Image (spheres, helix red, strand yellow):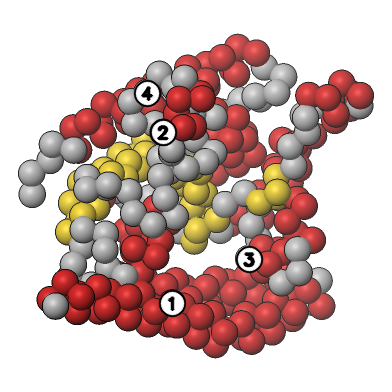
């Protein structure tokens, strides 16, 4: 009977959390898209910067309510190390291992209002999606367009064009610090993916250095530091619904701040020596992260 009551209670919590998310989103839709429309119809740079600032404040309210169920929950045990020493005076990039959609909620919980406004690169094609694409444009998410080797062979002038597009979309961040999220593995960890990749890491998929290089190349010296974030669920990875129901028993996070030095910035497409260097650097980062996960599984707290 007790187990049944706990199960029903957890499901009700999940339903209420989802209703809160939906209500939060609907309530903020009108002010968000009103400001976005005003930004679009008045093509004055100073006005658009002001509108962007206001849109971020609306998004802050949305994130606050998104985090509220977790902030109110006493069920999840958190062990976080390294966050207190983080100081980010300018733009930064977060490199994170990825296992579940809960990772995004963890990042919001830990970094909301502690680092600059959240951003991530979006594919150019997504800008054409109704409603979603307009939201990406309104909050100035940087645009990325990747050309395949086949496309570049057919049209050689496309070589380096992806970096050029990314740099242009990042120009607006010169006076506005941002935090770029980067799930370096490109997808969530699964044992079948790990086996298919023949990954040399115990807990991680193979990292993709191209995404890291693209951000560093596009933003250059605007990036002040890299936040190396490692997330571990010692009692097993749970789903987003489990998170809403309060079934994530324990979350462990390690944060390490790495300064961005000149050698980390280069041309990934045309500079073979830089490409080799950044690939080796990212692999070294992943080797350290793999060992760190072993250590985090033994944490006492």
How far apart, in angstroms, are the residues tagged by discs 3 and 1?
Answer: 24 Å
How far apart, in angstroms, are the residues tagged by discs 2 and 3?
Answer: 36 Å
How far apart, in angstroms, are the residues tagged by discs 2 and 1?
Answer: 29 Å
- Residue that extends furthest to the front in the rendered view of this protein: 1
SS type, badge 1: helix
Residue in view at x 27 percent, y 47 percent: 236
Q: Tell me if label 4 and label 2 are in contact, CB under 8 Å.
A: no
SS type, badge 4: loop
The answer to whether residue 57 of the structure is visible from this angle is no
Q: Which mark is residue 191?
A: 2
SS type, badge 3: loop
Which circle, 3 or 4, is nearer the viewer? 4
Q: Is residue 203 above or below residue 63?
A: above
- Mark 2 or mark 1: which comes first in sequence? 1
Q: Residues within 10 Å of mark 4 (few under 14, many from 20)?
A: some
Give the residue pinned by disc 3.
139
Q: Position of residue 99 (x, y in %)?
A: 40, 45
Residue in view at x 52 percent, y 16 percent: 277
- Residue that extends furthest to the left in the rendered view of this protein: 300
Q: Is residue 233 left or right of residue 111?
A: left
Q: Residues within 10 Å of mark 1 (few under 14, many from 20)?
A: some
Q: Which mark is residue 184?
A: none
- Mark 2 or mark 3: which comes first in sequence? 3
Q: Is residue 136 above or below residue 10?
A: above
Q: Nearer the viewer, residue 63 or 3?
A: 3
Give the residue pinned by disc 4.
201
């Amino acid at each position: 009977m007790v187990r049944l009551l706990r199960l029903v209670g957890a499901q009700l919590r999940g339903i209420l959390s989802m209703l809160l998310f939906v209500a939060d989103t609907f309530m903020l839709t009108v002010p968000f898209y009103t400001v976005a429309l005003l930004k679009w119809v008045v093509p004055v740079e100073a006005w658009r910067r002001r509108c962007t600032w206001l849109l971020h404040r609306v998004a802050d309210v949305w994130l606050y309510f998104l985090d509220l169920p977790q902030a109110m929950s006493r069920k999840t045990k958190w062990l976080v190390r390294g966050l207190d020493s983080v100081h980010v005076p300018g733009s930064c990039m977060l490199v994170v291992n990825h296992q579940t959609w809960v990772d995004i909620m963890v990042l919001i919980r830990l970094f909301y209002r502690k680092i600059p406004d959240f951003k991530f690169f979006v594919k150019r094609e997504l800008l054409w999606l109704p409603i979603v694409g307009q939201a990406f444009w309104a909050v100035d998410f940087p645009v990325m367009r990747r050309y395949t080797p086949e496309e570049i062979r057919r049209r050689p002038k496309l070589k380096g064009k992806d970096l050029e597009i990314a740099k242009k979309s990042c120009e607006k961040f010169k006076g506005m610090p941002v935090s770029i999220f980067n799930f370096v593995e490109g997808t969530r960890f699964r044992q079948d993916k790990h086996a298919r990749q023949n990954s040399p890491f115990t807990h991680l998929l193979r990292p993709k250095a191209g995404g890291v290089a693209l951000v560093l190349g596009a933003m250059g010296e605007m990036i002040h530091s890299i936040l190396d974030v490692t997330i571990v669920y010692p009692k097993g990875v749970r789903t987003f619904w489990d998170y809403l129901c309060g079934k994530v028993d324990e979350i462990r996070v390690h944060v390490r701040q790495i300064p961005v030095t000149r050698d980390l910035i280069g041309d990934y497409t045309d500079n073979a020596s830089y490409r080799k260097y950044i690939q080796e650097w990212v692999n070294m980062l992943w080797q350290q992260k793999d060992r760190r996960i072993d250590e985090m599984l033994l944490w006492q707290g």
